[in-house]
Amino acid sequence: MASAGLEFRDVRKSFGAVRALTGVSFSVAEGEAHALVGENGAGKSTLLKILAGSLRPDAGEIAWRGERLDLRSPREALERGIGMVYQETLCFPNLSVSGNIFAGRELTRGGRLQERAMRDRTRALLGELHLAVSPDARAESLSAAHQQLLQVARALAFECRILVLDEPTTALTGAETDHLFFVLQQLRRRGVTLLYVSHRLPEVFHLCDRITVLRDGAHAGTFLRSHVDPDDIVRAMVGRDLPPRAAAAPRDEAARPALELRALTRRPCFHDISLTLRAGEIVGLFGLVGSGRSELLETIFGLYAPHAGAVLVEGREVRLRSPRAASRAGIALVPEDRQRQGLFFNMNVRHNLVMPSQAARGTVLVRVRAELAQTARLLTEWRIKAAGPAASADSLSGGNQQKVVVAKWLAIGPRVLLLDEPTKGVDVGAKFEIHELIRREAAKGLACLVASSDLPEVLALAGRVVVMREGRIQGEVSGPAATEEAVMRLATAELKDAS
Amino acid sequence: MNRLWHTRELSTVAILLLEIAFFGWYLWPEAGRPHPFLSAENALLVLKYSSIYGIAAVGAAVVIISGGIDLSPGAVMALASVVCGGLFVGADWPLGVSMAIALTVGLAAGALSSILIVAVRLPPFIATLGVMGITRGVAFIITEGRYFDLSSQLAGGWRPLGLPADWVAPLVMIGLAIVFQILMTQFQWGRAVFSVGGNETAALFSGISVGRVKTSVYLLSGLLASLAGVVLAAVQGQGKADLATGYELDIIASAVVGGASLSGGRGSVLGAVLGTLIFGVLRNALPQVPGATFYDRLIVGLAVIVIVVMDQLLLKRGK
């Protein structure tokens, strides 16, 4: 690592009394692929926002090739060659692909847009990224993966020398991730410096030369990939050893079925799904994006009407016309997108926590004292770190927000809990706690169906994994036969044959 | 006490008191003459005229908190005044029955809005814009340019419920403000309205019947607008198709001044009613300021902007 590329020198930032960064110093060599990891709240986002020019540090500085960068706006960062690819795909869904790439820096002549020049440049960029999309396609018609790559293309259009990627693979499938990595490797060969932020350690170890760990706003260490293994990194992130995982509970064949699906069909999302969940059982539902697993969960939860088939709860057939009916029948769903589907940011933690139980009970009058008691109980039981029941939902970290979403549903006392990506964008510590809590509830007799694209998570939680592909159940693996290879083979087999 | 200090309505009350103090000082009469603004009769006058807006603003605030908008109140008020006047004066029906039918018509207008929004899935702005045209149109068709004169029928000594006639509307407004403030803060229905306005998707995913909540708020808005229309007919002494033109915007402005956010999820019924009083005082006092005749619309417009900007600054400081 010869030349000093990108240097962070004693960067500090506080928000009121909260010290987000307490003097972070490390450097990224030019042309290196450098990973930045840490739990939520460790200060990664703050550091990235400073690098992107949308926040200014209280003290300290950032330098590139020994020269101080004084970034006052995202525009300035972009002009200095720093490109950002964010976790949530930030694009203009109403604009075309080329419109997105040139947004804010359109090619013009005498004030007139040079549509053709932009389209040609876009086509060239898309070719470099091996993206088979038209420059005129509207961004909203693109898949999540392509939208992500669109941001990479935008960074390339600005000829960025530093590319910052913040959790770029959260919404991507395995094959799409491979494509992204292929592109990133190519960029590296051209001398682009990569700063890669991710919770997914296998990706980090696959792509990056060095790994910097942040903890509680401080630099906890920078490690050479060849000198450490993922457990070392987790230890550095959490600052302690994680207790060993509990083994998945053995399947109790005698337990009564809590949820039965009989040939449930909703065209074109899924067909002929039959599945039985026993009380106390955790079943994994794995499938790539587009396999119909989210739609299946949402249909069981009454958001859509199935075209055929039946849903039985504890042996009795239920007609689920709305989420309200489903929750009354004892079915709860922890949705995939907690920001959009799970939380009310105009309300405090207490209001968020009591909402489903009140809706299910049909409460008329609000009883503040009972609500406070229920909130206090849930906050301690779930170890939710909040300033109190009156804290606003957006003051919580991602992990604690997710615990609120899970806890508010368990408060209705469901018999079946459906979880869609229960630990998406959640840090290692909170993920571990959420897993423990799911296991604990299952041990008490709750039947859980966990859909996740995080395969190690599915395997760690579930005793039995049902694999979906193209809207159908492709097979099931359980016990020692449940390995990553076996599941992936089921999830992708035909796709590989076709290509 | 500490909680009272943090309630959102306090700043609206403060603005109202400042406003009253200002006009009290500015319009102070020469020695020996009665104060033209600070008097019991004038206060009742302000309350009486504000209650027309205030009653409708209760419904408008609830709609805005639910994340929607209702553009029809002005037109519904006119239609209600025409229906009430037409039945009472034109057809000689008893006053109570005429009023009840006028309220039913308002409820029907609200029902039409809810169907268009919940079942047809039109954006609230478009749906209520349409309903605004339809209700105003029906009012014109019924009257054919005439108007119904109620004042001759409502003799001077008219005492509804044994109260002086001028007291009724302000009392109704205050009663509604209190009842709906409690419904919105202490009842699950109010919580559901806030949740739908804050995050409609999350509300659906939490097992709340979003459709039912939306239906209820537009029904309420229609009903209260027609009640305001009946009050308007009684106060003005006429039922006429072009009454209350543009009132919907004044009502929305009052709700916003009272703390409602047009993006939904925030606001208060009490604040909205206080907002109508702020504008009621302006409308009452400005004509008494010499030379201000042509400036009153301008000043009302500026007031909306200044109050909301002040409020945002206060909110930022509070954080």
Image (cartoon, rainbow, N blue to C red):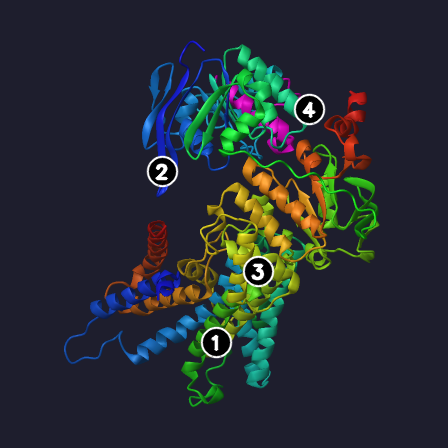
Compute the Cα span from label 3 to label 1: 30 Å
Q: Depth check: give the residue in front, B319 or B197.
A: B319
Q: Are marks 3 and 4 in contact (CB under 8 Å)?
A: no
Question: Would you name the residue on which mark 3 appears?
Answer: B192
Q: Amino acid at mark 3?
A: Ala
Q: Amino acid at mark 4?
A: Ala
Task: Identify the secondary structure beneath mark 1.
Answer: helix
Question: Would you name the residue on which mark 2 appears?
Answer: A14
Q: Are discs 3 and 1 located on one and the same chain?
A: yes
User: Residue A113's spot in the image, x, y percent?
Assistant: 49, 24
- In the picture provided, is B190 more to the left or to the right than A143? left
Residue B231 circle label: 1
Q: Residues within 10 Å of mark 3 (few under 14, many from 20)?
A: many
Image quarter of residue B131: bottom right
Question: Would you name the residue on which mark 4 appears?
Answer: A175
Q: Are discs 1 and 4 located on one and the same chain?
A: no
Which range of residues does the magenta coloring cover?
A130-159
Task: Identify the secondary structure beneath mark 4.
Answer: helix
Q: Is residue B84 visible?
A: yes
